[in-house]
Amino acid sequence: MAQTRSGAKAAANKHDRRYRSSLPDSFMQRAQRNQRSTTPREMKGKSSGNFIQRFFGFFISLCVNYIEYDCQLKHSQLARMGDHVYSAIDASWLDQLCMSKFWNYIVQWYPLWLAPNLITLIGLLINLVTVLILSHFCYSATEQAPSWAYFQAAIGLFLYQTLDATDGKQARRTQSSSPLGELFDHGCDSLTQVFVTLNVCYAMQLGTERHMVLTVMIFSISLFYTAHWSTYCTGQLRFSKFDVTEAQMTVIGILLFTSIVGSDIWNIRIFGWQLKTICMLVCLVGAIWQFFGYMNVIFNEGVGKNGSTVADTSVICPLSPLLAVCIPFLMLYCKSTSRVYDQNITLLCLCFGAIGAKATNRLIIAHMSRSELEVWDWIYLSPFIMILNQYYDYIVDEYLLLLVATIYAHISLIIFCILICRQFCEYLQISCFQIGHVKRQKSNDVGPSNNDGRKDQNLHVE
């Protein structure tokens, strides 16, 4: 038995080496070339100016090794992701009432050459642009924007919702379903929920109340992460009666209402409480209720051995990344002696959101590949450096460091997403944004039925 296991392990390692060697000009090969070009023998006797070249080569090598560690998937992970089948239970009452019929009508107008992932990306970019326009007028979430700014943000969110909901239908319509669809779709959703939360903060001017913007953002990121945490434990994504569609429609309604009557309406007092405070309390109570619902699923419905995750790991393990995302920003915000984070709350939330999105994407990959979740990520350096700066009495300007940390977090997230999608596309032998033949797709694989009786081949999430 021991010989069989060792033989299987050796075969797997050999397969991994063969797979890595087949990749075109990997990062490690480039790093080795850089190191060969800056060997000590070549540097000896040259001018001091070559020190810069050596340092630059070392820096490039360091960056390459960082990317290799941060973004490299094993062949076994890719193989399990390729065999992954999407499974979900959708109890959303708004989807069943009218939205599903609307989306079925809309998808008929899409050209057959339009790739599902391209639809999702277009929706994300539209939502990003509209949020950035609104943030130009409401950077600290205390200002009042023009009516048209709220209106265009509402339209942008509605367009994203429509495009995000019809990408899966387009995949089945063009017979281009693949596991990449779920990964790409949920990856875009992890960023969108940050934009949606910012829209609410801008419309209601939540920045006038200290701690409120960050509190709402923490609940938003934690709830989205916990939903995928429960999926990692059960292997099935569950939508409740009031879920994503209903929440997005509520935000669209808030933006449209604000564009008509103005943002001052949210400052009206009812029984001594501001209207926006009452609305946020109701939302937070609902979020807490849903959070404990996910916790009940996590601790009682694990499908692995002894109630563990799909990877047969502890159901507690995914808690570590969530705490690593939320606690540092709470410490930074609460212990800051200046108003830098309040005055730049948009920048703080974008940094926070990028880190939360990457942690969620790692959880999604762990679920799809049925592998152990990687707890550490180099993106956590962003808040860690800011905490060190705060501890040593602000050696570096807070705003400057926040700006650098935000840029670093988004670069880390973008590189991670691009390289993961590239590896998965190479394994599946497909293009991310073009419809083509999937050589590794199993024609007989048919997923579970949706509520309306359709069958999902392999997968593309709706």
Image: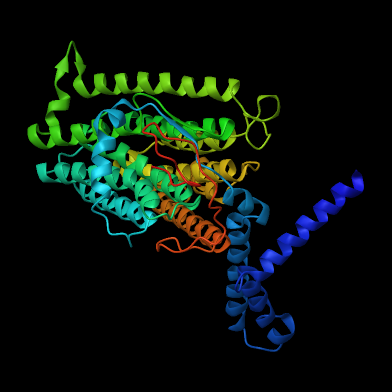
Give left or right: position of 428 versus 187.
Answer: right
Residue 32 on image: x %, y %:
67, 74
24 over 146 or under it: above or below: below
Q: Quadrant of residue 339?
A: top left
Residue 327 seen in the current view: yes
Of the pair 338 and 221, the residue shown nearer to us: 221
Q: Which of the image's four quarters has the N terminus?
A: top right
Give left or right: position of 198 versus 32.
Answer: left
115 over 219 or under it: above or below: below
- Residue at 33% in and 43% down: 165
Residue 73 on image: x %, y %:
62, 55
Of the pair 439 and 460, the residue shown nearer to us: 439
Give left or right: position of 297 versus 14.
Answer: left
Residue 362 on image: x %, y %:
55, 45
Q: Residue furthest top?
A: 271
387 over 240 or under it: above or below: below
Residue 421 on image: x %, y %:
50, 57
| Colour logic | rainbow
Residue 246 seen in the current view: no
Q: Which of the image's four quarters has the C terminus?
A: top left
- Residue at 37% in and 58% down: 115
Q: Quadrant of residue 213?
A: top left
